[in-house]
Amino acid sequence: MSATKEQILGVLQRVKGPDLESNIVDLGLVSEVLIKDEKAYFSITIDPKRAEELEPLRQAAEQVVADIAGLKGATAVLTAEAVAGAGGSGGSSAAGGAPESARVTRARAAGGGNGAAAPRDANPSGPQAAAVPGVKHIVAVASGKGGVGKSTAAVNLALGFQANGLKTGLLDADIYGPSQPRLLGLTGHPETLDDKHLKPMEGYGLEVMSMGFMVKESEPVIWRGPMVVSALTQMLRGVAWGDLDILVVDMPPGTGDVQLTIAQQVPMSGAIIVSTPQDLALIDARKGLNMFRKVKVPVLGIIENMSYFLCPSCGERSDIFGHGGAMNEAEKIGVPFLGEIPLHMDIRATSDAGTPIVASEPDGAHARIFRDIASKTWEGIQSSAGAKPAPKLVMES
């Protein structure tokens, strides 16, 4: 007999909440529950400042659900929300602001409502955004719409960082349409290291995680927003990333739950917007850029992809999608223009073959473009972080 959502919520009532009096279900801390392939998935909303302290709570909840007959396992994720009135003198409950967090979670599960899920005004890179252990910098590669070559740009940019001497990871955050396994030629499933962490896959020296490793390439992920957010949180915090200088996040197109989750729950060093030159793409690119600005994530710059086409036979240049639109937009809104990536068959062919051009042709012209963009991005990260040059030692005579 299959387990039901009611059974899961019933056993979760045995788990005491952060106040050690009420249970996590009655406190409204459990998000919508998903049962898939005889496994249960759910998230527990907490005050982010107590994430480490409440890890035993997560483990206890996961264990009681895993013990239900008819289930092969369970995954519980701690979902951190900003505490209402944090830093103030009121509005907090004994559960560390849990009722307000629960209202935000329920509003998201219902698809919105009274603005409860709107971006916070506070800087998400502040104290409420818990760092990912071992990861120094997290950079989102985003676009306002699909079809602009964002995933190809993301993987080659990650390889560009690596070529420039940085220890780099790549998170494919497009839960519904993961691309990185195909782009890197990776197959198989991540190894489980312990009860809490997965070992990332490795491709061309990059540490990689993607929903594409969990499901078949042809199998759709039919999940509602809260479960997508839970899966993303698990891939961010449930993966043993090790010591990384930078984690590149290949974002899904648009400005929805995934983008907000990453922006609000981890301290991001910045975001890069990928666009093609034409006006239609730039309209959507502005939306993505403004979303990051609203949640106080620095915009490190804009990349113009498919910027121009050079005929391999005659050498004639054609601006198929126009040219210079992203550069003009960057100048207009006051963000760096990181570079132009041409529309070229070699970039397309190596991507389809799972051999990204920065890895397969490291000395080629296209690889140099991505390495240069990586260098400019790193300079922007260091500048945003307020990095200062090392002091010079002066010997007194």
Image (tube, helix red, strand yellow):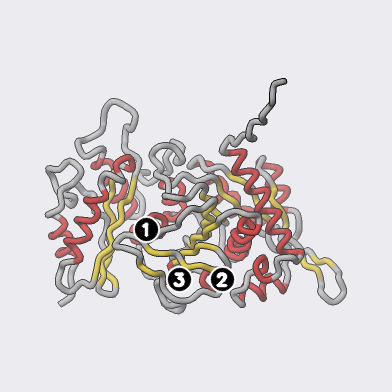
For disc 2, the marked residue is 184
Q: Amino acid at mark 1?
A: Gly
The correct choice, above or below, for 25 with respect to 312 in the image is above
- In the picture, measured across the screen, residue 145 lies left or right of residue 105, that is right
Q: Quadrant of the C terminus?
A: top right
- Which residue is tagged 1? 238
Amino acid identity at mark 3: Gly
Residue at (48% x, 63% y) in the render: 174
Label 3, residues with CA under 10 Å away: few <14, some 14-19, many ≥20: many
Q: Is residue 302 left or right of residue 89?
A: right
Structural crowding at the residue carrying mark 1, measured as other residues with C-alpha within 10 Å and reported as few (<14), some (14–19) or many (≥20)? some
Whether residue 248 can be seen here: yes
Q: Position of residue 373 (x, y in %)?
A: 68, 53
Please name which of the two marks, 1 or 3, marks the residue nearer to the observer: 1
Q: CA distance from mark 1 to mark 3?
A: 16 Å
Callout 2, which amino acid? Leu
Residue at numbered disc 3: 212
